[in-house]
Amino acid sequence: MKLETIAVHAGKNSDPGSGAITSSIQLATTFEREADGAFPHGYIYARSNNPNRKNLETCLAALEGGAAAAAFASGSAASMAVFQALSPGDHVIAPLDVYYGTSVQLRELLERWGLKVSYVDMSDASQVEQAVISKTRLLWVETPSNPLLKIVDIDRMVAIGRRAGALVACDNTWATPVLQRPLEMGVDVVMHSTTKYLGGHSDVISGALISKVEDDFFRRLRLIQASGGAVPSPFDCWLVQRGVSTLAWRVRAQSEQAFLVAQFLSRHPKVAAVHYPGLKSHPGHEAAARQMKSFGGMLAFQVKGGRDAAMAVAAGVKVFTRATSLGGVESLIEHRASVEHPGTRTPDDLLRVSIGLEHVDDLIEDLSQALA
Ligand SMILES: *Cc1c(COP(=O)(O)O)cnc(C)c1O
């Protein structure tokens, strides 16, 4: 079945009580047992599992082409579960420009619990190869990266991971399963902040892990989900699943529009650089063209005149909203350096943009007047 059809139907069931064609939201925290203690519907207590989470997990596994999925209360809880499933002394290789929140988890929380982490420029596979040691257990991939849209060659990471006997996990939040299929390329686990494109409407914080096979590592992730307890509410699961129904069409439109905005910006005299993998000038263009169906709805650009000039552009927009995050129907613009830590590697003149579903002419006109 094709992705659009999966997105509409996977994990959906009409309500047997009323015939309502959308799944009902089951808020119960606990489920009745038979006289002999059996629980024929499979549910005991809602932290361990519940109907809306099960529906969402069925949907997400089908969407990414995985064997099983585990939904979490946020993307951060999902990435945390992957790291917690490792053991003290295990070695992780992560991108230098890994999502800021993920780097905080590794540096501030997990290194104290004995994980060893090497940060390398993953867009250069030879740096990853050189970082492998006998204790390497996980390659954490994120592509396109934030905020410079660097592209990591997934095929090469899978090859390096295999040789090292290490798992390969991919944060697929930015690309989405519409544009990039990590599990089909040999990646072991896909992570999502479903807060972004999958939810798609900037109204739910949530995350997920999808595993290629239901192996011991995935069973460990399940254990962390249920006993760690960072689980999404039934309503949050329902919202994410509703968002997923339109995912393919939203992402395709956002991606087309981002390409037009990137082209406009790359011709603008006040723009010093545009970071969008769809542009031939982008250093990751070829790898992106190989592993992505199109280039996504995210881009970043640098404004001539430094930080103040960039801040003035962000201050001047009328259709874009100044806010962090991405993947919603509304276009967002953000001066990324000011929300990251003081030592951030993000250039001071850089604005990051998430393209929404407004008409692209209005978006271009808005940036045009803000840059004037
Ligand atoms: C937002 C985001 C996260 C974190 O997800 P939350 O849902 O905010 O916890 C992780 N990785 C990427 C690439 C993100 O954009």
Image (cartoon, rainbow, N blue to C red):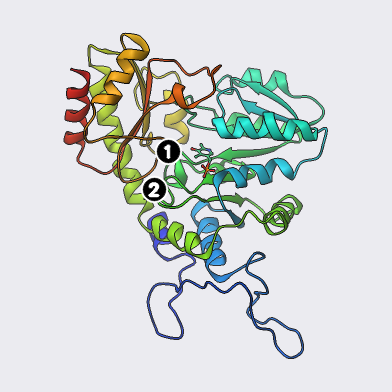
Position of the C terminus by quadrant: top left
Secondary structure of residue under mark 2: loop
7 sits to left or right of 80: left
Instruction: Count neighbours of disc 1 (C-alpha within 10 A) and say few if under 14, some if 14 to 19, many if 20 or more.
Output: some
Identify the residue at horizontal 81%, vertical 40% (top origin).
87
- Give the residue pinned by disc 1: 325
- What is the quadrant of residue 349 in the picture? top left
65 sits to left or right of 361: right
Q: Is residue 54 above or below residue 128?
A: below
Disc 2 vs disc 1: Cβ atoms closer than 8 Å? yes
Identify the residue at horizontal 59%, vertical 69% (top origin).
50
How far from the left and from the top, in percent, is residue 83?
Answer: 70, 40
Position of the N terminus by quadrant: bottom left
Q: Is residue 345 above or below residue 85?
A: above
Along the line of sight, the residue nearer the viewer: 257 or 214 = 257
267 sits to left or right of 81: left
